[in-house]
């Protein structure tokens, strides 16, 4: 556009006769404002058009960001009138500027040249207006082409999407695998379809499935004509369609899990950006899904939902990042659950979850509220060096194995009311920056709070210590309540520091209670333990 205008202006200047240069030079006070106004008008139109198309995407299959406005019906008549007015004004001004010198023949020649120059200026304006129309016509053509390419791309993507989805419904495992990999390739090439692809894969994993028993229990011999119990059978009422082999289906589901994991890792093992990463906003909804030996180590999970999910085998979430919340309510972990070093940026919900194997949250960081209410830990549970920046709840949680919270940091309120620790539990070196509640908790094994730091109030009211309890060198900055607590074994507060009030009202001591070297209210205490009321 700008190049065409410069060319037309150059042609117009060349066509101006030499005698008229003096005339033009004498009229610069009028020409300069007119030229400036025209330049400002053209620049404004161009900038306005650029402002409207600066965000337009021309590469298929992305759609255009805006609609092209229809040309107003008055534009052409106004443009023609403007050209006529400019031409008439130029001719009139040049005619009025003809010098009154020379004879009539010379003045007539000058007048003819002035008319020709005025018409040339009109032609230049006409050319500029034509270029504007051509520019708009080119825009319309490009947008039409872009829309055509987008529609063709969307049609191709839809066909591939539907075909891949149909393949997932096949009774043949190789066909289902082909459908999964077709969806993966489609999502890799079309970023706008990645979330929908993930949703399809998650929906597939949510379908009912019973993992095969790799180690079946020996049974009595069966007759030779009896059917093979490991062979796939048809579902009731669907005898025409053969059932899926659970062993083949296992491989399909493992492939689906690997596809999700492959595209949820933002970095490679070497720390470089992963070229297959699909972005931090991909959400997962695996509610009631059956997952087998899941490996999501190092993955970025945005708004992940695993409510009532059954994790068959191990489940690895080490160094994973959960943003915008993680929901594992009523989830079942049949094997080891590894969350070591995981980061929970939002809330983490494990209410009524069941951990049949070990549960490892060593070094994990919980930025929001962490809820483990009524969770069941059948194996060992490790929360050593974990950081709870928000509140944490283990109300009525059941720890059948050992539990470790050594050197853990509780920056929010910690609630362990009604929790049961069937074996030993360790809070050695743990830091409770705010209050902590262990009211009604049951410690059937040892309870170690050695060198723990309680900056706020802490309550053990009604707690039962059936094994030995150690609070040696612990620091209690707030009030401490052991009212109605039961100590069936020995309890030691050696070297502990109590800065606030301490209450043992109604507490029962069946073993030895030692306060050697303890400091109560700033006074060192080396006498016998308190007497139960």
Image: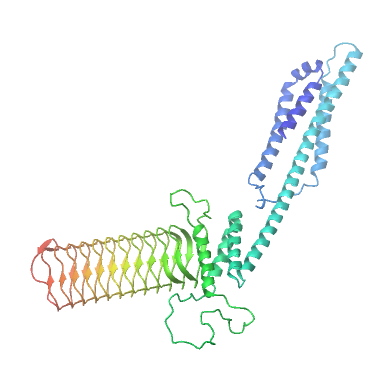
Q: Quadrant of residue 420?
A: bottom left
What colouring method underlies this structural image?
A: rainbow
Whether residue 292 sits left or right of residue 519 in the image: it is right
Where residue 191 appears, x then y in whole percent?
59, 55
Residue 454 falls left or right of residue 212: left
- Specify the farthest residue to the top: 102
Counting from the top left corner in percent of width and height, residue 36 is at 70, 29
Q: Nearer the viewer, residue 44 or 461?
A: 461
The quarter of the rendered structure image containing the C terminus is bottom left
**Looking at the rendering, in which quadrant would you find the N terminus?**
top right
Viewer-proximal residue, 367 or 96? Answer: 367
Q: Is residue 383 above or below residue 396?
A: above
Q: Quadrant of residue 40?
A: top right
Observer-nearest of 138 and 354: 354
Between 299 and 528, the one lying in front of the other is 299
Give the farthest residue toward the front.
224
Residue 131 appears anywhere in the view: yes
The image shows residue 445 at horizontal and vertical percentages of: 23, 74
Q: Is residue 68 among what the camera can see?
A: no
Q: Is residue 237 above or below residue 368?
A: below
As drawn, the residue found furthest toward the left would be 527
């Amino acid at each position: 556009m700008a190049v065409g205008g410069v060319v037309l202006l150059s042609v117009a200047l060349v066509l101006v006769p030499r005698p008229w240069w003096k005339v033009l030079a004498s009229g610069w006070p009028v020409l300069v404002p007119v030229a400036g106004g025209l330049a400002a008008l053209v620049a404004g139109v161009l900038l306005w058009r650029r402002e409207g198309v600066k965000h337009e995407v021309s590469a298929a299959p992305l759609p255009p960001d805006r609609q092209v406005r229809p040309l107003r019906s008055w534009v052409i008549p106004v443009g023609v009138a403007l050209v006529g007015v400019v031409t008439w004004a130029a001719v009139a001004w040049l005619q009025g500027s003809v010098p009154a010198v020379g004879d009539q023949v010379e003045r007539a020649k000058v007048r003819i040249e002035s008319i020709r120059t005025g018409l040339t200026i009109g032609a230049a304006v006409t050319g500029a207006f034509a270029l504007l129309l051509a520019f708009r016509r080119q825009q319309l053509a490009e947008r039409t082409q872009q829309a055509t390419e987008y529609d063709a791309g969307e049609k191709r993507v839809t066909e591939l999407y539907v075909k891949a989805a149909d393949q997932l419904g096949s009774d043949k495992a190789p066909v289902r695998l082909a459908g999964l990999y077709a969806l993966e390739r489609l999502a890799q090439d079309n970023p706008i379809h990645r979330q929908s692809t993930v949703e399809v894969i998650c929906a597939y994993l949510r379908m009912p499935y019973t993992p095969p028993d790799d180690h079946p229990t020996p049974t009595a011999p069966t007759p030779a004509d009896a059917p093979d119990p490991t062979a796939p059978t048809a579902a009731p009422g669907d005898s025409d369609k053969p059932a899926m082999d659970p062993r083949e289906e296992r491989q399909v589901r493992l492939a689906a899990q690997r596809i999700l994991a492959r595209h949820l890792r933002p970095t490679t093992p070497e720390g470089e950006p992963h070229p297959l990463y699909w972005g931090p906003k991909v959400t997962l909804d695996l509610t009631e899904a059956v997952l087998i030996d899941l490996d999501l180590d190092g993955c970025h999970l945005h708004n992940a939902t695993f409510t009532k999910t059954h994790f068959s085998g191990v489940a690895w979430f080490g160094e994973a990042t959960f943003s915008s919340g993680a929901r594992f309510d009523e989830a079942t972990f049949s094997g080891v659950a590894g969350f070591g070093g995981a980061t929970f940026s939002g809330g983490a919900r494990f209410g009524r979850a069941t951990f049949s194997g070990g549960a490892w949250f060593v070094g994990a960081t919980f930025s929001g509220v962490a809820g483990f209410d009524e969770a069941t830990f059948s194996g060992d549970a490790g929360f050593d060096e974990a950081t709870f920046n928000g509140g944490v709840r283990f109300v009525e949680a059941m720890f059948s194995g050992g539990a470790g919270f050594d050197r853990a940091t509780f920056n929010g309120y910690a609630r362990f009311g009604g929790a049961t620790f069937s074996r030993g539990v360790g809070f050695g070196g743990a830091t409770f920056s705010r209050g902590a509640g262990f009211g009604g908790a049951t410690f059937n094994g040892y309870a170690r709070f050695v060198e723990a730091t309680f900056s706020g109030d802490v309550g053990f009211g009604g707690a039962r210590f059936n094994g030995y309890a150690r609070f040696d060198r612990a620091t209690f900055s707030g009030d401490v309540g052991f009212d109605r607590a039961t100590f069936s074994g020995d309890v030691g507060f050696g070297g502990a520091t109590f800065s606030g009030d301490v209450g043992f009202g109604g507490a029962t001591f069946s073993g030895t209670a030692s306060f050697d070297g303890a400091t109560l209210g700033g006074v060192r205490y080396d006498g016998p333990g308190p007497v139960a009321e």
